[in-house]
Image: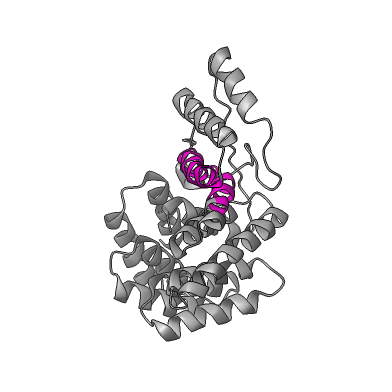
């Protein structure tokens, strides 16, 4: 999980929704007209300006589609529209998905990866589609959109698990999509299944720790994050949340130690600011 996602989750835990939208890019009129024409008939269920959140940790730096990227999208989509056979169409769909990924349009990328996967089914192709939908789910601007994208991600990952039931990354991501539904316990059960199969699975341990924090069970969160940093002492997110959990349970001196360690593991200025704020509260 990226640093930007860490801070998104911090905001979620505090019930603060901070949405960052992709700014529109000023391009010359010829490029703008070309792009508009080729993007005028988007399939239902994905969007060109869907308000993907690129994370508070990105400071004020948003992912901006350059004129070159807009032209690439227009060019590949034109090829997709002109494809005369299913094989060509599925191949170009994958290229179009890659182009959307470049500009962080993950729901659109998921849509075209799904088209490619359905045309040529396989574990890797469904995994790409699932990962794109999951990324879009992570940054969904509303509960409704999160539910929709989570369902799409699950559908793709379930195809992966049909081919490879031991693919734990897919199972972990399915679990996290369930957390956003009316049946969060199903997600927790899946995470526990992952831990049973692989006790040192960092992603599952990390997410169980986050869920413990979300329910204010900081003692359990501390246990999870201690486990995580014992597996991977350089896990930035795990170290940060261990420090937060220690602070929440009154273990201030040890919390200070781990907050200071975070600063040695990452040179990210936004994260350093967050750490300094926590340290100021503890001193």
Q: Is residue 24 magenta?
A: no
Across and down, in percent, residue 147 comes to 68, 60
Q: Which residues are magenta?
A: 86-115
Q: How many marks?
A: 0
Extreme residue in the front direction: 85
Front residue of 186/34: it is 34
Front residue of 132/21: it is 132
Across and down, in percent, residue 205 comes to 43, 75
Asked whether, in this view, residue 2 is left or right of residue 159, the answer is: left
Majority secondary structure in the magenta region: helix
At x 58%, y 61%, the residue is 153
Image quarter of the C terminus: bottom left
Q: Is residue 71 visible?
A: yes
The relative height of residue 108 versus residue 9 in the rendered view (above or below) is: above
Extreme residue in the top direction: 29
Across and down, in percent, residue 19 comes to 61, 44
The relative height of residue 129 versus residue 223 in the rendered view (above or below) is: above
Q: Is residue 248 visible?
A: no
Across and down, in percent, residue 191 comes to 51, 77
Front residue of 80/1: it is 80
At x 42%, y 84%, the residue is 197
Q: Is residue 102 magenta?
A: yes
At x 58%, y 69%, the residue is 214
In which quarter of the view is residue 241 placed? bottom left
Image quarter of the N terminus: bottom left
Asked whether, in this view, residue 151 is left or right of residue 253, the answer is: right
Asked whether, in this view, residue 195 is left or right of residue 52, the answer is: left
In which quarter of the view is residue 41 placed? top right
The relative height of residue 267 versus residue 252 in the rendered view (above or below) is: above
Front residue of 121/135: it is 121
């Amino acid at each position: 999980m990226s640093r930007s996602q860490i801070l998104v989750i911090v905001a979620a835990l505090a019930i603060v929704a901070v949405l960052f939208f992709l700014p529109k890019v000023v391009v010359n009129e010829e490029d703008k007209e070309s792009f508009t024409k080729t993007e005028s008939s988007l399939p239902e269920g994905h969007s060109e300006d869907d308000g993907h959140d690129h994370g508070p940790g990105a400071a004020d730096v948003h992912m901006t589609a350059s004129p070159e990227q807009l032209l690439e999208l227009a060019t590949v989509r034109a090829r997709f529209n002109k494809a005369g056979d299913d094989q060509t169409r599925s191949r170009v769909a994958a290229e179009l998905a890659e182009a959307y990924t470049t500009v962080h349009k993950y729901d659109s990328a998921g849509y075209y990866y799904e088209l490619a996967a359905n045309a040529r089914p396989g574990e890797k192709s469904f995994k790409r589609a699932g990962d794109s939908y999951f990324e879009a789910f992570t940054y969904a601007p509303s509960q409704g959109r999160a539910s929709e994208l989570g369902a799409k991600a699950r559908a793709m990952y379930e195809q992966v698990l049909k081919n490879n039931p031991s693919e734990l990354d897919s199972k972990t991501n399915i679990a996290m999509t369930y957390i956003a539904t009316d049946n969060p316990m199903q997600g927790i059960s899946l995470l526990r299944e992952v831990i049973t199969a692989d006790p040192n699975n960092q992603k599952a341990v990390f997410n169980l720790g986050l869920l413990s924090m979300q329910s204010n069970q900081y003692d359990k969160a501390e246990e999870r994050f201690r486990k995580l940093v014992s597996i991977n002492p350089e896990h930035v997110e795990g170290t940060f949340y261990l420090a937060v959990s220690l602070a929440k349970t009154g273990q201030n001196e040890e919390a200070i130690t781990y907050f200071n360690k975070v600063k040695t593991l990452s040179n990210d200025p936004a994260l350093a600011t967050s750490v300094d704020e926590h340290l100021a509260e503890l001193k």
